[in-house]
Amino acid sequence: MRSLGYGLDSENAMSNLTPINNRPAYLLVFEALQEEILSGRLGEDTAIPTEMDLCKQFDVQRSTVREGIRLLEQSGLARRGSGKRLYATRPRTSEAAESTSRGLERHGVRFIDIWEAIATILPETAVLAARKMQPKHLAHLHQLTANLEASEDSEHIVFLSVEYLQAVWESTENRVISIMLQSLNMLVQSSLREVFDVLPNPRTRILKAQKHMNAAFDSGDGALAAKWMVRHVDDLRRGYEVAGIDLNREVGALSKSG
């Protein structure tokens, strides 16, 4: 099989690692195609070479190529078009966020870790959003606030509150910010109902913050938007404390005990 550009420095490699040449050929095919897609050399919705072409390029059997392609599809990096032709694609933000969320949970992140990250990122995200906000984004935020004001259902209030914050970070059109904040949101989402239930007048408090942020976004005032975002995030920490949730406890441990 021809080299696909993968190897290890033999002087630095650990003795218990499997030699690179002994790795399955289909895995090397997958990794080579994955690199082409993630690097952008094989652009979104670009047709991937046919199985026969890949066999010639990599000098492998068709079954090897098919197994590599199967892994590519499972990873969300390829899709079938008309005539079963394969096209390159990139993972959606939600898929990347879910993967990041699982990784953070496995690393034993605590509620305090998540809150500190949110408290650091969200206010600056509000500043960026105020600078990049488009009319369609503003209209969406105002509609979410109106829906929140009209809602009496606690579950719906939680949902709309999360939707509002997501709309703010998505308005930045920054994939890194969106993936990071969505992954953090996934970690705490199950506990938000408990937090909202113990806060005094949660809808009133959330509405006040949202209306002030909307006004700040309307005028492009990033500093004011950040100020109210800070207050909004501080309410989240207060809710955890009132609910008796130990901020030093691991998120995964809490979900398992519940």
Image (tube, rainbow, N blue to C red):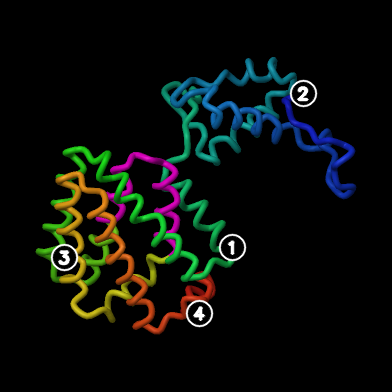
Residue 112 on image: x %, y %: 47, 70
Mark 1 or mark 4: whose residue is earlier in sequence: 1
Q: Residues within 10 Å of mark 3 (few under 14, many from 20)?
A: some
Residues under labels 3 and 1: Cα distance? 36 Å
Using the image, tell me which numbered label, if any, was put on residue 106: 1
* Picture coordinates of residue 146, whole percent (x, y): 11, 57
Nearer to us: label 3 or label 2: 3
According to the picture, the residue beneath numbered tag 4 turns out to be 257
Residue 159 picture quarter: bottom left
Q: Magenta residues, as a range?
A: 164-187
> Would you say residue 229 sits in the magenta stretch?
no
x and y percentages locating residue 43 in the rendered image: 48, 23
Pointer 1 local density, CA inside 10 Å: few below 14, some 14–19, many at least 20: few
* SS at mark 2 in the image: loop
Marks 4 and 3, the one that precedes in the sequence: 3
Q: Residue at x 45, y 26 (%)?
A: 44
Q: Amino acid at mark 2?
A: Ser
Quadrant in which the N terminus is drawn: top right
Query: Within 10 angstroms of label 4, few (less than 14), some, or many (20 or more) residues?
Result: few
First of labels 2, 1 by sequence position: 2
Q: Nearer the viewer, mark 4 or mark 3?
A: 3
- Tell me how far mark 2 sits from mark 1, CA to CA: 34 Å
Within-10-Å neighbours for mark 2: few <14, some 14–19, many 20+: few
Instruction: Determine the residue positioned at 54% across, 66% down.
Output: 109
Label 4 or label 2, whichever comes before in sequence order = 2
